[in-house]
Image (cartoon, grey):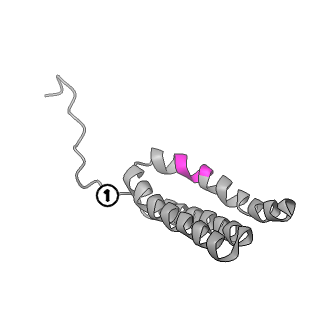
């Protein structure tokens, strides 16, 4: 019984690995705030889906919702990584070196 449900959760692994590969690139490209704005709702929606799946369909529903959560998370990160670079609005220009007058 447990083995069958573990197999379903394994479908989430490629999406988890893909998400982990995308996150460092998003941080180094200066998209920390956008990353949080995308991942927080995906995590909340996915977690609620796991709870509802458990309540309505038991372990199978929770496993399917968990896989869907990882797909949603990876898709959100992929969309963010392929979007344009963040604008420079609100960023200060680099200070001029002393003695370059």
Depth order, front residue of 94/55: 55
Name, please, the residue furthest toward the bottom.
56
Q: Which residues are magenta?
A: 20-24
Q: Position of residue 64 (x, y in %)?
A: 69, 70
Residue 101, picture quadrant: top left
In the shown orientation, is residue 65 left or right of residue 44? right
Q: Position of residue 59 (x, y in %)?
A: 72, 67
* Residue displayed at 74% across by 71% down: 60
* Residue displayed at 71% across by 66% down: 63
Q: Which quarter shows the N terminus?
A: bottom right
- Where 45 sits versus 86, above or below? below
Residue that label 1 marks = 87
Q: Is residue 82 visible?
A: no
Q: Please say whether residue 101 is one of the residues in the magenta stretch.
A: no
Q: Position of residue 80 (x, y in %)?
A: 48, 62
Q: Is residue 22 visible?
A: yes
């Amino acid at each position: 019984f447990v083995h069958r449900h573990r197999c379903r959760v394994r479908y989430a692994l490629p999406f988890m690995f893909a998400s982990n590969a995308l996150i460092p690139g998003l941080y180094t490209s200066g998209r920390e705030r956008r990353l949080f704005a995308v991942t927080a709702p995906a995590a909340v929606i996915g977690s609620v889906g796991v709870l509802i799946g458990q309540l309505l369909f038991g372990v199978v529903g929770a496993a399917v919702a968990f896989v869907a959560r990882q797909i949603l998370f990876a898709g959100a990160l992929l969309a963010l990584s392929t979007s344009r670079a963040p604008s420079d609005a609100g960023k200060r220009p680099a200070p001029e070196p002393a003695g370059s007058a």
